Amino acid sequence: MVTVAIVGVSGYGGGELARLLSRHPEARVAHVVSETYAGQPLKRAFRGLSGTPVGELVCQKSDAVRSALAADVVFLAQENGAAMRVAGEILDLGKRVIDLSADFRLRDIELYEKWYKLEHQSAELLIEGRAIYGLCELNRDYIQGAKLVANPGCYPTATILALAPLLSCGLISREGIVVDAKSGVSGAGRAKNDLDYKYAEANESVKAYGVGGVHRHVPEIEQELSAHAGPAPVRITFTPHLVPMTRGIHATCYGRLVTPATTTEQVLDALHQTYADAPFVVVREPGDYPATKDVSGSNFCHIAAKVDAHTGTVVLTSVIDNLVKGAAGQAIQNMNLMLGLPETAGLEGAGLWP
C-alpha cells in the first residue's frame, strides 16, 4: 500500500485529491496539511468527505518536508512558489513528488520568472531535467519511474491533447493556431478573492480575461506544442473565458490545414492512432461534439474534430473537468505511472450525468 501526503489539502485541488484517493485501491492518505484548517478534521473543509476515513484525518500545520516523512508520495497543491522551496529536500528524503502548481512546468527558468514574477529557487531541478512534464498520454515513457512530476495546467491539458497529434503528423501549420477556451469558476481556486468570481457577478454572464496573449498558460501550451511540432516554435492566440458553471474546461481550437484537401476522417484517424492506448481520452464520432457535463467528475478528456473546407481550417473541441483531468485526477494518474500501478487505479469512474 502506497502512503500519500497532501500539502495544501483545503484548496479545491487538494480536496479533490482527497476525494479521489479515498477510493484508490493501492494508496492510503496518511497525512494532510492545511494552514487554514490545522487541528481540525478534513471533513470540516469538505463536508462531502464526512463518513470516510479520509474525512476524519486531522489537518496538520507541519511543513511539507516534515509531512513527507509519513508518506511515499507527496502531492504539493499549494500556490505557485511554494513547491520550488521544498521539492529538493523532499526528493533528498527518497520520496516522490507531484506538484500541482506551475513551479516545474516551464523548462526555461527565465520564462518562468517572466510570467510568474517569482525568482525560481530550485533551478537545478529544471537544469538537470529531473522535473518531468506530466501530461500522461503524451509523456508516459518519461513519467514512468520519475521522481518529480510537474502536473499540467487545466487549459494546457485540454488544448495540448487536442492539437499535439495534428502537429506531430504535420496535418496543421505551426502558425495561426487559435484557442478559444472556457472555464468554470472553480478554476480560479478556492482562495480567490476577486469580485469577478462572486455569484452575482459571474452568474448569467460570460467574460473574456487574459486577453492578448497574457494568460500564464500560454508559454506552457507553446512549450509542449513546440515539442511535438518539430524544430520551429509554435505560437498561439489564446483567449480564456469565465463562464457561470462550477466545473469544466471547453477548448475550441482552430488550426490551418497544411493540405487543404485533408478530411475530417483523416484528422480523426490521427487522433485515434495517438490515443489508441490512452484509457482516458475519448475521440468522438464525426458530428458528435462533447459538452463539459459529459466529463464532469471524471478523469476523461473528450475530443471532437471537423474540417472546415471553406477556410482550410480544422476545428477541434476538447472538454475536461478542470479539477480532475485538469488537476487532481491527472496527478493521481501520474502517481500510478510513476509507481508502476495500473494507470486507471482510483480513476475508473465515468462522468456524472445529468
Image: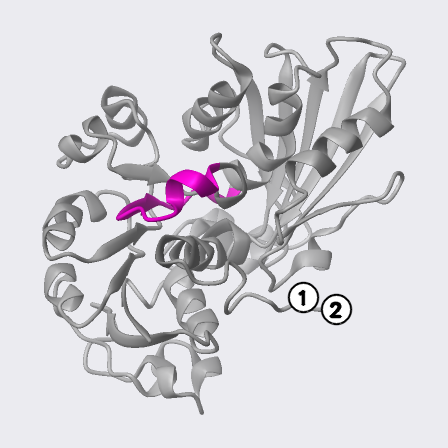
Q: How far from the left and from the top, in percent, is residue 182?
A: 62, 41
Q: State the extent of the magenta-drawn residues as a range.
A: 139-154
Q: Quadrant of the C terminus?
A: bottom right
Secondary structure at numbered mark 1: loop
x 26%, y 53%: residue? 97
Relative to 328, does residue 10 appear above or below in the rendering?
Answer: below
Relative to 266, does residue 9 appear above or below in the rendering?
Answer: below
Type of amino acid under label 2? Trp
Secondary structure at numbered mark 2: loop
Residue 283 appears in view: yes
x 50%, y 67%: residue? 345
Relative to 232, does residue 55 appear above or below in the rendering?
Answer: below
Q: Is residue 221 magenta?
A: no
Q: Is residue 148 magenta?
A: yes
Q: Label 2 belongs to which residue?
A: 353
Q: How far from the left and from the top, in percent, is residue 238?
A: 56, 25
Q: How far from the left and from the top, in percent, is residue 70?
A: 17, 72
Q: What colouring does the structure picture have?
A: one colour
Type of amino acid under label 1? Ala
Q: Label 1 belongs to which residue?
A: 350
Relative to 241, does residue 96 appear above or below in the rendering?
Answer: below
Q: How far from the left and from the top, in percent, is residue 306?
A: 83, 29
Please tell me which residue lies in front, 216 or 130. Answer: 130
x 49%, y 45%: residue? 136
Q: Which mark is residue 201?
A: none
Please tell me which residue lies in front, 1 or 325. Answer: 1
| Residue 239 location, quadrant | top right
Nearer the observer, disc 1 or disc 2? Answer: 1
Q: Quadrant of the N terminus?
A: bottom left
